[in-house]
């Protein structure tokens, strides 16, 4: 009886071990940043043009009449179409900032919190195709960063944590062929890296 009981215990222990290691477990304990909504209710609706003589930029801070400016700053093309617009709090970019092509199409949409890049940043080619989709947390790259060729083909998908490469890093030529595919763990690269992201490639030719 004692022998049978011991065998049952061993079997139960073995089953527990198999299920413990067979089930998917988190690879690490990284915490994805929680992006709070940037509060802009305290920003006045006052709007001023970029070239206003009372507006000065010093050390990255906008001043108007020697005081940090809070409100909206915009710029226009010679054709009177909107070029840039953004909200500022105490002289710092705070909230959404947009830039536009001369034809009026959106070029970039960026989010800031007290002067720091924060949340999603989007960019578009002039033909309307998406150019980039970046994520920042307190001015540092965080999560998956994506970029596309003007044709709409994927250029790269890079993974960052605290502004450092961390996880899978992938890139493609414009013809769809992979030229970079590696993983970064604890600062060490594992996998294929044929070239750096310093230029684009089309049909395996420098572009």
Image: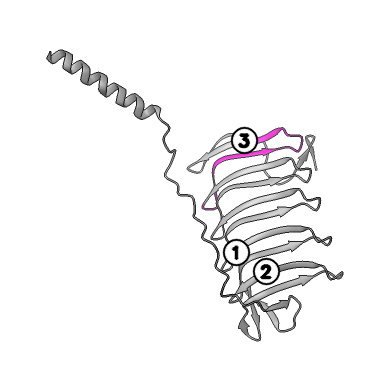
Q: x%, y% of residue 25?
A: 41, 35
Label 2: which residue? Answer: 86
Disc 1 versus disc 3: distance between alpha carbons?
31 Å
Label 3: which residue? Answer: 181
User: Pointer 3 and pointer 2: residues touching (CB < 8 Å)?
Assistant: no
State which quadrant residue 94 falls in.
bottom right
**Mark 3 Cα within 10 Å, few/some/many (few <14, many 20+)?**
some
Q: x%, y% of residue 102?
A: 83, 62
Q: Is residue 102 left or right of residue 166?
A: right
Label 1: which residue? Answer: 112
State which quadrant residue 136 falls in.
bottom right
Q: Which residues are magenta?
A: 162-181
Q: Which mark is residue 146?
A: none
Disc 3 versus disc 2: distance between alpha carbons?
37 Å
* Label 1 secondary element: strand
**Mark 1 Cα within 10 Å, few/some/many (few <14, many 20+)?**
many
- The disc, 1 or 3, on the residue closer to the chain's N-terminal end is 1
SS assignment for the magenta stretch, majority: strand
């Amino acid at each position: 009886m004692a022998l049978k009981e011991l065998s049952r215990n061993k079997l139960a222990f073995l089953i527990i071990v198999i299920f413990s290691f067979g089930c998917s477990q988190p690879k690490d304990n990284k915490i994805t940043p929680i992006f709070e909504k940037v509060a802009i209710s305290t920003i006045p609706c006052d709007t001023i043009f970029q070239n206003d003589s009372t507006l000065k930029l010093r050390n990255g801070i906008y001043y108007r009449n020697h005081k940090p400016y809070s409100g909206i700053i915009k710029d226009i093309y010679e054709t009177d179409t909107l070029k840039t617009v953004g909200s500022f709090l105490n002289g710092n970019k705070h909230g959404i900032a947009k830039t536009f092509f001369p034809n009026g199409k959106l070029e970039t949409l960026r989010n800031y919190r007290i002067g720091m890049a924060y949340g999603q940043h989007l960019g578009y080619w002039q033909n309307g195709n998406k150019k980039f989709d970046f994520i920042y947390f307190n001015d540092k790259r965080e999560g998956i960063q994506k970029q596309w060729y003007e044709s709409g083909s994927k250029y790269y998908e890079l993974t960052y944590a605290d502004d450092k490469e961390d996880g899978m890093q992938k890139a493609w030529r414009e013809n769809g062929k992979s030229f970079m595919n590696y993983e970064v763990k604890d600062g060490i690269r594992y996998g294929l890296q044929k070239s750096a992201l310093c230029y684009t490639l089309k049909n395996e030719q420098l572009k």
